[in-house]
Amino acid sequence: METNTPRRAICLLSGGLDSSTSLAIAKQQGYACYCLAFDYGQRHVVELNSARKVAAALGAEEFRVAKIDLRVFGGSALTGEMDVPKDRAEHEMGAGIPVTYVPARNTIFLAFALAYAEVSGAADIFIGVNSIDYSGYPDCRPEFIAAFENMANLATKAGVEGTSKFHIHTPLSKMNKADIVRAAASLGVDLSLTHSCYDPGDDGAPCGSCDACILRAKGFEEAGLADPVLNRK
Amino acid sequence: METNTPRRAICLLSGGLDSSTSLAIAKQQGYACYCLAFDYGQRHVVELNSARKVAAALGAEEFRVAKIDLRVFGGSALTGEMDVPKDRAEHEMGAGIPVTYVPARNTIFLAFALAYAEVSGAADIFIGVNSIDYSGYPDCRPEFIAAFENMANLATKAGVEGTSKFHIHTPLSKMNKADIVRAAASLGVDLSLTHSCYDPGDDGAPCGSCDACILRAKGFEEAGLADPVLNRK
C-alpha cells in the first residue's frame, strides 16, 4: 500500500442514527470507508434505502448489501415473528433481553464484516454499539467486542500471516443518545436521511411509539435539537 | 428441560465426509442433532442434497439450510470467482492459504450455528474441522475454535443469563483422512451419500482431481476401504 493511501475501514451501516454517526466518525478519523448493510428479512427494509443514502452523503468508497437469512431461526420481533412492543417506558426497555433481540446478530454481522475486511485489505471495523444498547443486548457489550477482536485475529489469513491486526472500533460505546445526536450534528451527518424505527409505515414514516422511536426522540430532546425526520412528515 | 430429554447439539453439515462423520459422532454421544447447512453460492450445490440425505440417514431431529450470500465478497474458487486447482500433489496443497479458502467462512458458519443454538436451546455445536484442513485454513485451527467459544459465551442471552455455556466440539481435530474414513465406517455412516468434490460434474459425479477428491481417495486407500461414491459411477 502506498504511503498516502488512506487506511480502509469496514463500517457496519444500518442507516440508523447510531451506525451513521459511527461512519461519520470513521470518516473524520481519515479512513476510506467500505460500508456493509444487511438484508436479513427485517420488517423495516426502508432502512436499507437510508443506509445507501447515508453512505453516499458521507462519501463512502463502497456500499454493499449482504443478503442473509435470519428468519430461518425465527425468534425476534425484528424479523416479523413477534409484535414490536409499543409505548414502553425506558425502565421497561432495560429489563432483560428485548424481544427485538435477533439471536447472535452482532456476531453474524461482525463475521461478515471480517470477510469483507479480508477481501478489501481493511484491518479496521467500525460498529455503532452504544451504552443504551448494551443494557439489553448481550452482543453490544465491550467484553463481547474484545472477545470478537481476539477471535478475528486467529480466524484470518491476514491474522495468521501477520500482515495486519484487526481492530473493532466502537466509537459510540460510552455515548448516550443525546451525545450521539450532538456528535452527528457536529460532524455534519444529514440526520434527515437516517432511520431508526423498528416498525415504520408503508411510506417509511416512523411509528413514533416503538423503543427505537422513543429513545431517538429522547436523544434529540436532550440534545436540544429537532429531529428532521419528524419535521419531514 | 426434562431429565430424560437428550441434550441438543447443532451440527454443521456440508454433506462431506468430515461433517457427516462429525454428525455421526455427536449422535453416538447421545445428542439430539439439529443440522445446519449453508447455501452460500458455492459451485457444488450438489452437496446440499448430500447433506439432507446424510441428516435423514443418521436420524437427525432437524435439517435446516441457511441461505447466505458470500459472493458479495468474491475472493474464492469455491464461490466461482477463480478456477479450482486440479491434480496437485499434497505438498502443494499445504503451501500457504489455498484458493478454495472462503474469507472468514468458519467464523460466519459458527456465528449462524450460535444463532440456531440460541433459538433451539442447544449448548453444543459440532464442526468437522480436522488436522489436514488446518494446515492451510486459519479458521480450522484449535486456537481459533477456542477463541470462538470464548466469544460465544459473551455474545448470547444464554451466556449472559448463565443458563448455558456453549461448547464447540471438534471431534475430528486430531484425525487424518484415513482415521475419519475408519471412524465413519465403524459408526455406520452411509458413505455413498457423502460428497467431497469441489468441482463436480452436472450429474454430481466427483471430478477426481481437485484437492478434496485427492485427499478423499488417499484417505480411503490408507484405510483399506473402497469409496462407494466412486463405485457408483
Image (cartoon, coloured by chain):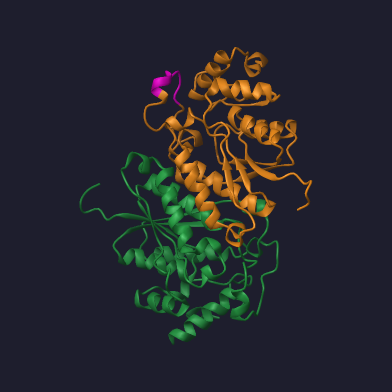
Chain colours: A orange, B green
Residue A201 seen by the camera: no
Residue A213 seen by the camera: yes
Check the image and report above or below for B195 versus A114. Answer: below
Q: Residue at x 34, y 47 (%)?
A: B121
Using residue A52 as the reference point, say whether residue B214 is left or right of it: left
Using residue A68 as the reference point, say whether residue A62 is left or right of it: right
Closer to the camera in the image, A144 or A40: A144
Give the magenta range: A85-92
Tell me where residue B111 appears, x and y as whole percent: 48, 50
Closer to the camera in the image, B144 or A162: A162
Please identify the residue farthest to the front as the structure is shown: A3
Tell me where residue A204 appears, x and y as whole percent: 62, 25
Closer to the camera in the image, B223 or B200: B223
Q: Residue at x 68, y 62 (%)?
A: B80
Q: Residue at x 52, y 16 (%)?
A: A218
- Which quarter shows the C terminus of chain B? bottom right
Using residue A92 as the reference point, say whether residue A198 is left or right of it: right
Check the image and report above or below for B197 versus A189. Answer: below
Tell me where residue A9 appears, x and y as whole percent: 66, 43
Tell me where residue A208 appears, x and y as whole percent: 54, 18
Specify the quadrant of the image occupied by residue B163. top left
